[in-house]
Image: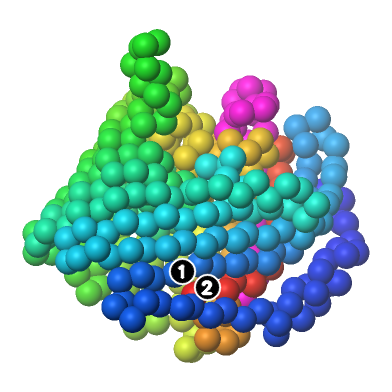
């Protein structure tokens, strides 16, 4: 790949660093403590370079932002509700907006929750109650319309959800996902076995998942695996290593290998931290993510990330296009810097 100069990236980084000194947050809560206001803001600078499938080399850099603001109302010990607004609401797994684009603000969460002892039931537009660490299978930014159930029994937890992707009304069966997961957790270990039944037209209808995490002093190691019933390209896995250097600094290393038909929706509902070509999720790629985390102030943090990736199967690369999650570039590199504020 051609050696591009990062012409504007240093300037962007300086602007981002200056911005952190000006951002502040405040929260007003009712005296009874039933209403909680929460939100977050991210300012992002990123540089991309790629070699397309046809051999053409390109590069770009851009500034982006993400903003989310929500209200949680605790009616009593059993009932609660939450609403949240976010930018770029049209995208299911990326609320980030490029400078100069329409912010496209709307509701990304609106749900009602009932909790009784060890049982929890929620309905509405909500985070999926699926435990994973790398977001390989499910992006935490995707809040589907769902009915979910969770039950805690000692060290074990049962998660289940019925997700409506598209209500087809009189036209036939809804596009939907059924999810079931059993999670075992202790101080040092977390192990989860999951199952997805997907009805959205993608090749993989039944997907089995495994997640395992081990934590020791300052260290975290995670492995995640997904195996589908597709005839070909049906395996995905992610490895993750984290090291807390001190109270303010940490490093992470990830490796992803995601075949084209290995995860729900062929990748439409998974992470988009690696460059997402068509705004439709991502699969058919392998790559590395290296990240440095730095705490700047109370509730303000910075991270610097490097992504390096390439396509796995040229046959699926040839199928890529608008609305397709299949990665098709020969290779791609992204350098990214984020300033994150939350309250």
Element marked by disc 1: strand
Local crowd size for mark 1, using a 10 Å CA cut-off: few (<14), some (14–19), many (≥20)? some
Specify whether 309 is left or right of 162. Answer: right
Can residue 99 be seen from the camera position used here? yes
The question of residue 55 being in magenta is answered with no
Q: Which residues are magenta?
A: 302-328
Local crowd size for mark 2, using a 10 Å CA cut-off: few (<14), some (14–19), many (≥20)? some
Residue 147 location in percent, x, y?
A: 27, 40
Q: Camera-side residue: 233 or 206?
A: 206
Give the image quarter of residue 217.
Answer: bottom left
Can residue 282 be seen from the camera position used here? no
Q: Camera-side residue: 308 or 141?
A: 141
Q: Are marks 1 and 2 in contact (CB under 8 Å)?
A: yes
Q: Camera-side residue: 261 or 93?
A: 93
Task: Name the residue located 65 percent from the left edge and 46 percent from the top edge.
Answer: 104
Image vertical order of residue 329 relative to residue 189, above or below: above
Badge nearest the viewer, 1 or 2 = 1
Q: Say the numbered circle drawn on residue 38.
A: 1
Q: Residue furthest front?
A: 31
Element marked by disc 2: strand
Image vertical order of residue 277 relative to residue 173, above or below: below
Marks 1 and 2 sit apart, C-alpha to C-alpha, by 8 Å
Total marks shown come to 2
Residue 135 location in percent, x, y?
A: 45, 52
Residue 281 location in percent, x, y?
A: 55, 39
Task: Name the residue located 44 percent from the left edge and 69 percent from the top edge.
Answer: 37
Q: Say the numbered circle drawn on residue 342.
A: 2
Task: Name the residue located 75 percent from the left edge and 32 percent from the top edge.
Answer: 53
């Amino acid at each position: 790949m051609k050696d591009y100069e990062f012409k504007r990236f240093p300037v962007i980084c300086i602007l981002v660093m200056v911005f952190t000194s000006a951002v502040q947050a405040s929260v007003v809560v009712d005296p009874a403590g039933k209403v909680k206001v929460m939100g977050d803001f991210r300012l992002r600078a990123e540089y991309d370079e790629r070699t397309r499938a046809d051999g053409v080399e390109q590069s770009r850099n851009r500034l982006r932002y993400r903003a989310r603001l929500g209200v949680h109302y605790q009616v009593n010990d059993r009932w609660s509700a939450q609403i949240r607004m976010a930018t770029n609401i049209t995208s299911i797994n990326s609320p980030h907006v490029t400078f100069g684009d329409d912010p496209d603000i709307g509701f990304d969460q609106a749900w009602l929750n009932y909790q009784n002892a060890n049982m929890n039931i929620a309905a509405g537009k909500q985070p999926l109650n699926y435990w994973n660490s790398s977001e390989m299978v499910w992006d935490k930014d995707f809040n589907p319309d769902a009915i979910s159930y969770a039950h805690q029994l000692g060290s074990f937890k049962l998660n289940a959800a019925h997700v409506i992707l598209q209500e087809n009304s009189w036209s036939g069966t809804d596009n939907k996902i059924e999810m079931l997961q059993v999670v075992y957790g202790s101080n040092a270990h977390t192990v989860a076995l999951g199952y997805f039944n997907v009805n959205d037209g993608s090749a993989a209808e039944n997907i089995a998942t495994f997640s395992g995490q081990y934590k020791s002093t300052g260290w975290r190691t995670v492995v995640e695996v997904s195996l589908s019933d597709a005839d070909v390209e049906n395996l995905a896995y992610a490895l993750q290593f984290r090291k807390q250097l001190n109270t303010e600094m940490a490093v992470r290393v990830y490796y992803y290998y995601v075949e084209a038909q290995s995860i729900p929706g062929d990748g439409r509902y998974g992470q988009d931290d690696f460059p997402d070509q068509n705004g439709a999720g991502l699969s058919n790629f392998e790559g590395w993510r290296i990240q440095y985390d730095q705490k700047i102030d109370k509730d303000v943090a910075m991270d610097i990330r490097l992504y390096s990736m390439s396509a796995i199967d040229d046959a699926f690369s040839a199928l890529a296009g608008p609305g397709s999650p299949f990665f098709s570039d020969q290779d791609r590199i992204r350098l990214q810097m984020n300033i994150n504020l939350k309250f």
